[in-house]
Each structure stands twice: as C-alpha cells, then as structure tokens.
Image (cartoon, rainbow, N blue to C red):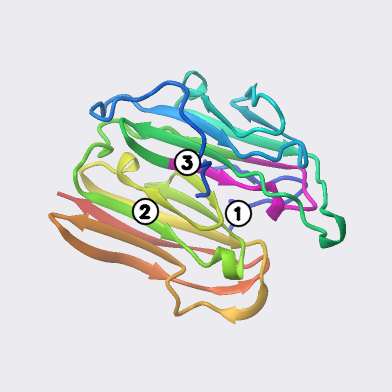
Amino acid sequence: MTQFTTVLRVLLLAPLCAGVASAQVETPVSPNACGKPSYVLQVGSGRDRTPLTVKLNDKAIDLGKPYQAASKSVSASVTDQNRIQVDWTPKKLSDAGRMYGVPVTLKMLYGSRATTLFQFDPKNYPNQRQVAVKFAAPPPNNLACDKNLYTVKLGYSNAFGPFEWTVAVDGKYYAYILGDGDVNLRPFLKKGANRVTLGWRVIGGSGKNNLGKNKVAQVISTVGGKTSNLLTFGFKNAVGSSGSQSVTITVP
C-alpha cells in the first residue's frame, strides 16, 4: 500500500478508540439535534512526560496545561479537506524503554452520535516525532442521522499489533485509527451503492501469529433490526506488512 509512509512521520497523502473518558466537550450538544456536525479534539494526560503539539489545517490547538487531559472544540478549523498533525518529543520510561501513553482523538458529533476520525498514541512510535493524516469532510446528504447502523470494528492490536487503519468510502479517506476501535460509517455513506475500503499496516508485531482466520477487521450492518457481517478478514502480524479489503454497502 502507498497510503503509509514512515520517514520520521506517517503521511497519508490520500485522506483518514481510545478516547478520553473523563474529558468533557466544551460546548454541550443537544441530544435531539442531528444536523450540522461539530468536532472535538481530545488529548489524554501525561503530556509532561511525552510533550506533544497538535495542528489542524496548520493551526495549532491550545492544549492547556501539559499534565492535564484536554477536550477542545475545533469545529471552526475543519474544512472540506483537512490535515491533522501531531508532533512530539520521544521520552522513554526508565529501563522499560517505552513512552507514556498520550491518546489523541478527533471526534465528529452529529447531535449525541460520535464518530472517530483520528485515533493515535505516540507510544506506538517510539523512534518517530511526527504523524500527519489527511481526511475529507462527510459527503452531503449522508446517513449520519439514519436509524440503521453501519460499523467498522477493528481489534487484535492490543495483543498482536499495533496496526494502522484507514477507512475510505468511494475513494475518499475519512478516518485513521491506530490500534483497536470502532468507526461509525453512517456519516460517510449515502443512499445507493457505497464502496468501503479498509487499509491496514502492521507497525508492531512478532510475525509469528497468522491472524488470517481471525476477525481482525469487520464491517457490520444492522438494518431493520437484522445484523449482518458484510466483511471479515485478518492477516499475519509481521511488521511492515500491509493491504486492503473492500466491500460494497448498498443503502436502500
């Protein structure tokens, strides 16, 4: 795959869940509203141990005090085509040789419904200093408020990874996930046929585990109360291996 490039940074030239449970959205969103999306950047605590900065479309985000978790509204900075960049100073933990975890998550909210667009933690890149990812805004007339569910489920990173994931629909990149997590596909789908592509790359693993028969990645729909597994696949956890799988979701 060519989406992933590692040269002191990871840059997805064709655009994109460990969230911060205790962080609060700055501007409350009505649970009954489901029209215009809002965007929230969440950063975990511990930045005094692994200092980092975040930019959205080249605009630096004020993360507040370096030892506290942060939750910032960034809706004003989001456009049709976007780029999020995280820079950090590697800082290892004594003899363990690992960095403290500092999860960085960008979420899109339609009313009370949240979708993860970007999920990253620099502890998985101990020898790097930057990650940069491009992602597109949702298409018009999307299904963000639809009652049916369309979900990407990503697992096994915690035990065999970590793995990098991109989520694309009809050639546009909408989400980047490092590690395990779920992605709500509804904001990226429209009525009719939608080609969903999951790209993956192994950035950490022994290479001894063939996960080809495991449900490492799944695309699941729940329509009219009936749940269907639309796509399931796995792969060997050898560092540097990559690939993609696609499925067409037809929305009536």
Tell me if mark 2 has few (under 14), some (14-19) or many (20+) residues whose alpha carbon lies within 10 angstroms of its own: many
Query: x%, y% of residue 232?
Result: 38, 69
**Helix, strand or loop at disc 1?**
loop
The kind of residue tagged 2 is Val
The numbered dot on residue 196 is 2
Q: Which residue is mark 3?
A: 117
Say whether disc 2 or disc 1 marks the residue closer to the N-terminus: 1
The kind of residue tagged 1 is Thr
Query: x%, y% of residue 155?
Result: 48, 64
Residue 5 on the magenta span: no
Residues at marks 1 and 3, CA–CA distance in whole angstroms: 20 Å
Please report the residue visible at 29 percent of the width from the left and 49 percent of the height from the top.
194
Q: Which residue is mark 1?
A: 2
**Helix, strand or loop at disc 3?**
strand
Say whether disc 1 or disc 3 marks the residue closer to the N-terminus: 1
Residue 119 on the magenta span: yes
Front: mark 2 or 3: 3
The kind of residue tagged 3 is Leu
Up/down of 47 relative to 167, above or below: above
Please report the residue visible at 68 percent of the width from the left and 51 percent of the height from the top.
5
- Front residue (pair 34, 85): 34
Could you tell me if the residues under marks 1 and 3 are in contact, i.e. CB atoms within 8 Å? Answer: no
Q: Residue furthest right?
A: 95
Q: Residue furthest top?
A: 76
> Could you tell me if residue 16 is visible in this image?
no
Query: x%, y% of residue 22?
Result: 51, 38
Tell me if mark 1 has few (under 14), some (14-19) or many (20+) residues whose alpha carbon lies within 10 angstroms of its own: few
